[in-house]
Amino acid sequence: MSQFEAAALGALAGLTIFIGLPVARLRGLSKPTQGLLNALATGILVFLLWDILAHAAAPVDSALQRAHQQGLGGFALLAAIFAIGVGAGLLVLVYSNAWLLRWARRDESGAGATAPTAPAPQTLAMMIATGLGLHNFSEGLAIGQSAASGAIAFAGVLVVGFALHNITEGFGIAAPMSMSPAPVPWRVIGLTGLIGGGPTFLGTMLGYVVKSEPVYVLFLAVAAGALLYVLNELFAVCRRLASPRVVAWGVLIGLLAAYATDLFLTYAGS
């Protein structure tokens, strides 16, 4: 498979994220319905966080198992990359969002900084898109590496599975924007789609020419840290909009839906 063909597959897998994005334009929804939509998105992201951490930890565990024969150097490097990546993904969003909120409030009031508030729906959606973009970059690496190694059938299975995942991820990005008082412009929706899905294409291009375990672990770890921050924000949104029962059902259904797509990927690749 040529690099152009691999890149086309990566683009296809990433662009399916746009299928779920029109949910952002829904209006006239009651608060419980908004809460349910956001809880569904939260459940999807809970599964993705679990999936990302499992894949990021696998090379670290393998390096630890090899430590008896090869020493602890390789394990120490990957473990440090994992820890730094998770910390960077989480803390960069914590501090940058706090700064942006203080700046926005000061600009609106003309006074000093006020107490931080919850991020606006579009801001939260952009944060989700950023975290998912990092995750999808690592998926693109897997597609590119498989295509370059000649595992064309496996690369095709990855594309199908990741494309299904990205549909649910698009919904996860769009759900917070459905709470915006005015319809979100299509250009903003398109931008979140590019940020969330575009890195699949970029990762495929890089993965075709470079196979690096540390890079793979780094991007997965950063994505996990970013999703930790986003999940905290989404849970807060869900609690404001809906009862604990509605939130629990939404999270459960979203998690199981994402898990089902992962099971399909596993079955198709077996």
Image (cartoon, rainbow, N blue to C red):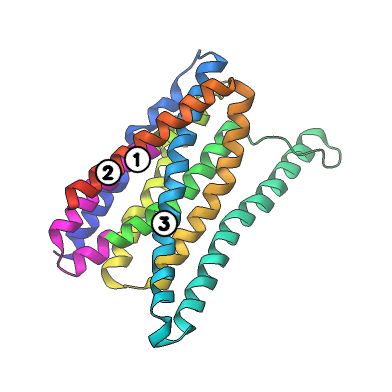
Res 215 label: none
Seen in the picture, residue 227 relative to 21 is either above or below; the reply is below
Left or right: residue 207 compared with residue 9: right
Asked which quadrant contains residue 62, the reply is bottom left
Secondary structure category for the residue under label 3: helix
For disc 2, the marked residue is 263
User: Measured from the top left, where is residue 99 in percent x and y?
Assistant: 72, 49
Question: Which sits earlier in the primary sequence, circle 1 or circle 3?
Answer: 3
Q: Is residue 12 visible?
A: no
Question: Which sits earlier in the primary sequence, circle 2 or circle 3?
Answer: 3
Left or right: residue 149 compared with residue 141: left
Asked which quadrant contains residue 52, the reply is bottom left
Seen in the picture, residue 3 relative to 29 is either above or below; the reply is below
Query: Do the residues under discs 1 and 2 have CB atoms within 8 angstroms?
Result: yes
Mark 3 is surrounded, within 10 Å at the Cα level, by few (under 14), some (14 to 19) or many (20 or more) other residues, namely few
Asked which quadrant contains residue 180, the reply is top right
For disc 1, the marked residue is 259
User: Measured from the top left, where is residue 90 in percent x and y?
Assistant: 60, 54
For disc 3, the marked residue is 54
Q: CA distance from mark 1 to mark 2?
A: 6 Å
**First to last magenta residue range:** 143-169
Residue kind at label 1, given as amino acid type: Tyr
Secondary structure category for the residue under label 1: helix
Query: Do the residues under discs 2 and 3 have CB atoms within 8 angstroms?
Result: no
Residue extending farthest right: 111
User: Measured from the top left, where is residue 75 in percent x and y?
Assistant: 47, 77
Looking at the rendered image, the quarter that the N terminus falls into is: bottom left
What residue lies at 34% left-to-right and 40% top-to-bottom?
Answer: 259
